[in-house]
Amino acid sequence: MARVPAAERRDELVNAAIRVIASRGVDGATTRRIAEQANAPLATLHYCFQTKELLFTAVFERLTERYREVLIENDVHGDLVVTARAMLRGVLDWYLESDPEFASASFELISWAQRQEEHPAVTVYNEAFNVVRSILARAAAGQNVPPETIDEIGYVIGTLSDGFVVNWLTYGDRSRAAQQAQTVVDVFDAWLAVKLA
Amino acid sequence: MARVPAAERRDELVNAAIRVIASRGVDGATTRRIAEQANAPLATLHYCFQTKELLFTAVFERLTERYREVLIENDVHGDLVVTARAMLRGVLDWYLESDPEFASASFELISWAQRQEEHPAVTVYNEAFNVVRSILARAAAGQNVPPETIDEIGYVIGTLSDGFVVNWLTYGDRSRAAQQAQTVVDVFDAWLAVKLA
Amino acid sequence: MARVPAAERRDELVNAAIRVIASRGVDGATTRRIAEQANAPLATLHYCFQTKELLFTAVFERLTERYREVLIENDVHGDLVVTARAMLRGVLDWYLESDPEFASASFELISWAQRQEEHPAVTVYNEAFNVVRSILARAAAGQNVPPETIDEIGYVIGTLSDGFVVNWLTYGDRSRAAQQAQTVVDVFDAWLAVKLA
Amino acid sequence: MARVPAAERRDELVNAAIRVIASRGVDGATTRRIAEQANAPLATLHYCFQTKELLFTAVFERLTERYREVLIENDVHGDLVVTARAMLRGVLDWYLESDPEFASASFELISWAQRQEEHPAVTVYNEAFNVVRSILARAAAGQNVPPETIDEIGYVIGTLSDGFVVNWLTYGDRSRAAQQAQTVVDVFDAWLAVKLA
DNA sequence: AATGAATGAGGCTTCATTCAT
DNA sequence: TATGAATGAAGCCTCATTCAT
């Protein structure tokens, strides 16, 4: 077998894990299946990650990081309303564009994390929420918006995108989801108009 | 262990399954643990339900039924706006009142169903959606609301309550969730006002 | 497969474990090998003993019990000297007669027990020592022997028989061991004569 | 990790192996743990000793040598009785002084050797016995002692010290063992007096 | 009809060892 | 030469399920 630096192997395994989790659920994601998906012998998995849990933790971190990226990529540096809407829109579009795999794996992993003592599920949320908040805060600079409002806007963005993704994952109908994305943005706009009135 | 007729046992087993799923997740819900929780011999489980999958299907149906009930219980028989808001509020309150683990079990089970060939997760959603739609339709009678709008309202109710529950499950902080429920209703109201303007 | 009551199966497994431990050491005594030796599927082993450790504990108890029996069988109900000598002789003969397996397994298991937190190795020794002491005490009744002396005699019996068995297990030469048994008894007699002088 | 010449590493590895065996038993002495203990990469172990068995053989030889040394160090060059008693005493004291785990490792390793085809456990015993015999023979020179008696004395020394060490390992109570050592020497003296009468 | 006993398949992990550099 | 990377075999254990009664 070709000699591959451990770091690369780790990456492959994390990707494989995401694919398997997405398609078979966290509980269906056995070490054997992940190794197979990564085209590696089972023992290699344990060479790279001492433990299945450690592999999952790595997957978890990757997801967290990806969310961060998506949010930052969609920062349009406009005013509060424009920035907030763009961020929501960006997340929805990302869900629609990327393989449902990724979102699906996220949801599964959050359930998993919920049952782990360490690596609380809360981490992804907190991390994402912090990014959202800091982007919004910068956009609101000079507009005299109380911090509670910033937080509330962050919460609504999260709630709407979570709600959106649940439906999208359940039905998996992309064209329908595309329309729903528009509805979701409308909902957000309506509320924001009232909120910032 | 006392010999108990199969019919009774089926019920006990379904209840036991829900409890176990709630506390240990779908993958932690092994036949042994469910049987134990139901105070029944392991073999009895397979005597009553040929297969674990069949038991889970029964659980799934029970869940679907529960959603139906909650929706119907919260039908205030008012006009469209009032009825819609009450339904959303009712669902949110139900989530808040019942053990967070119950909602958790639902989500887990839906993920599970997603992966089964035979009993699509979509069923719960469709079922719930139909109930919502029929309640809304009746409330809208004589108000000349196009059916697409009814559907859209139903979708928003679903999206908001799903989004709400994800956060609630993640943080498990009841007092915070109670506040968020209000925000969610505000969001809904703002949009509905625009939509039905 | 014939339906066999669990108790019998457990017995078979304990016996198999003893055989395997004797021939391959505690560490060589894998669940697979034990199951094979007992002519049972691996899963059956775990049906009867939830854990390998529990099986070993059962083996351990069997050994302890066997020692007790041997000691009691060799109680000649004579005076102190006669009784003590008979007991030592009995143990040595038992070692010689029985398969070296048994003694070998004992020694291995004691090493094993030494490393377990629970089930301390000490148990077998304490148990055996108590039996020896009570037999000797009864034999010494009315002979005005201080209890420390009783204990010391017990210790010497133990030491001599342990020393004997180590050599016997190492060389496995029965005729040579038979001669050595005589030497050991001579040693004991010489000391006892001085001690009780 | 600094590159270290193989010759040095061999020594370090043998020492590491002894330490690991002492603390975790023969079965707990994995190649990884030994390498780690020796602060060497795992592959180095197999570079220095083609096989785990070869490493253990080296350990075994080191042990054999140590026994030889202890016996020779305790040769007082007196007459037969004095020399024999001193040798027994010396061995007992050595057991008492050194870590109980060292003796434990010896016993474990002897059990292990018993199960190897190639390097019979008997070697240590033979080697030790030869040393004992030659020391005793020299001490008996001119005293007209038949060689069988020399052998028998050697056997009794072995038996008593083995018996002693088993108890000492089992209870690990040093002060108690110190007293027992005296009893053991008394036993030896009593027998020797009769034997050489 | 109801259940204790039994089991094949597969779960995660660790082992001694080898390979490629 | 010396060592990170890799791996087949085997470790213990648990699963859903079936069988015999």
Image (spheres, coloured by chain):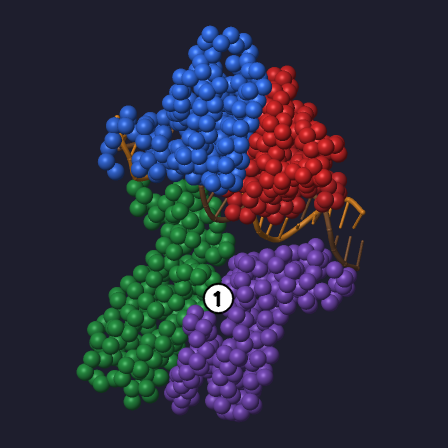
Chain colours: A green, B purple, C red, D blue, E brown, F orange
In this picture, residue C78 sits left or right of residue D36 = right
Q: Establish if C21 lies above or below A161.
A: above
Q: Quadrant of the C terminus of chain C?
A: top right
Amino acid at circle 1: Tyr
Please give the name of the residue rendered at 45% of the width and 55% of the height, measured from the top-left corner. Answer: A21
Work out whether residue C72 or residue C95 is closer to the camera in this orientation and state it: C72
Work out whether residue B147 or residue E10 is closer to the camera in this orientation and state it: E10
Residue A180 point in image, percent of width and height:
41, 73
Q: Quadrant of the N terminus of chain C?
A: top right
**Which quadrant of the view contains residue A8?**
top left
Work out whether residue D55 or residue C137 is closer to the camera in this orientation and state it: C137
Residue C157 point in image, percent of width and height:
61, 31
Indicate the chain on which mark 1 is placed: A
**Which quadrant of the view contains residue B128?**
bottom right
Count of numbered circles on the image:
1
Q: What secondary structure is marked by label 1?
A: helix
Q: Which residue is mark 1?
A: A171
Q: Establish if D66 lies above or below C42.
A: above
Please give the name of the residue rendered at 29% of the width and 89% of the height, measured from the top-left corner. Answer: A197
Is residue B125 among the parts visible in the rendering?
no
Residue C156 point in image, percent of width and height:
59, 32
